[in-house]
Amino acid sequence: MAAKKKKKASKKKSPSRAAKAKKTPARKAKKTAKKPAKKAKPAKTKKAVKKSPARKPAKKAAKKKQIVGEGDYQASRTFLKDQSSFVKKNKSSIPAMGREASRALEGPEGDALRQAETEAASHSRENLT
């Protein structure tokens, strides 16, 4: 019979949830004292790493148009620039250079200089037209 009693003891019904809810008295919510909010620690600032600017592909130099007709414009500009810089540098010595040239024409090499002058003149544009 002892075995039967154990069965009876284990067969006890547990109270239903609705019954449990009725038995439990309602509780008031606890009032908590307001505490000041914790201040966050100042964040450690990392030094900003300077990024190198993105490299752009090198631009290809545009082909310069060589304008040739009555002469090359670039060559003309270069010639004028060279002439003006020569005059600025040698302004005081140009008269002396002229006197040396006239003496050279009168001297022993004068014939060779005159011949070179006539040959250069024959190649000029004025004689070609």
Image (tube, helix red, strand yellow):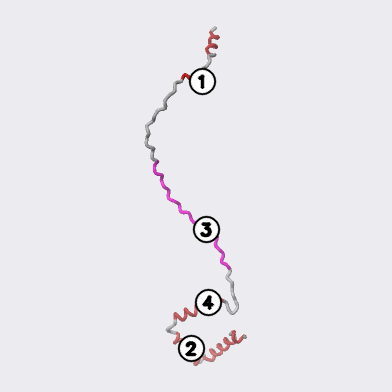
Disc 3 marks a residue whose amino acid type is Arg
Quadrant housing the N terminus? top right
The magenta stretch spans which residues? 40-62
Give the mark nearer the N terminus: 2 vs 3: 3
Magenta stretch encompasses residue 3: no
Q: From the image, state whether disc 4 or disc 2 is nearer to you.
A: 4
Q: Mark 1 points at which residue?
A: 18
Q: In the image, is 30 to the left or to the right of 127?
A: left
Question: Marks 3 and 1, Cα distance to the nearest angstrom?
Answer: 75 Å
Mark 2, secondary structure of its residue: helix
Q: Name the residue under label 3.
A: 55
* Mark 1 crowd level (few <14, some 14–19, many ≥20, 10 Å Cα): few
Disc 2 marks a residue whose amino acid type is Ala
Q: Is residue 60 above or below residue 70?
A: above
Mark 4, secondary structure of its residue: helix
Disc 1 marks a residue whose amino acid type is Ala
Give the mark nearer the N terminus: 1 vs 4: 1
Q: In this view, does 116 lie above or below 52?
A: below
Give the mark nearer the N terminus: 3 vs 1: 1
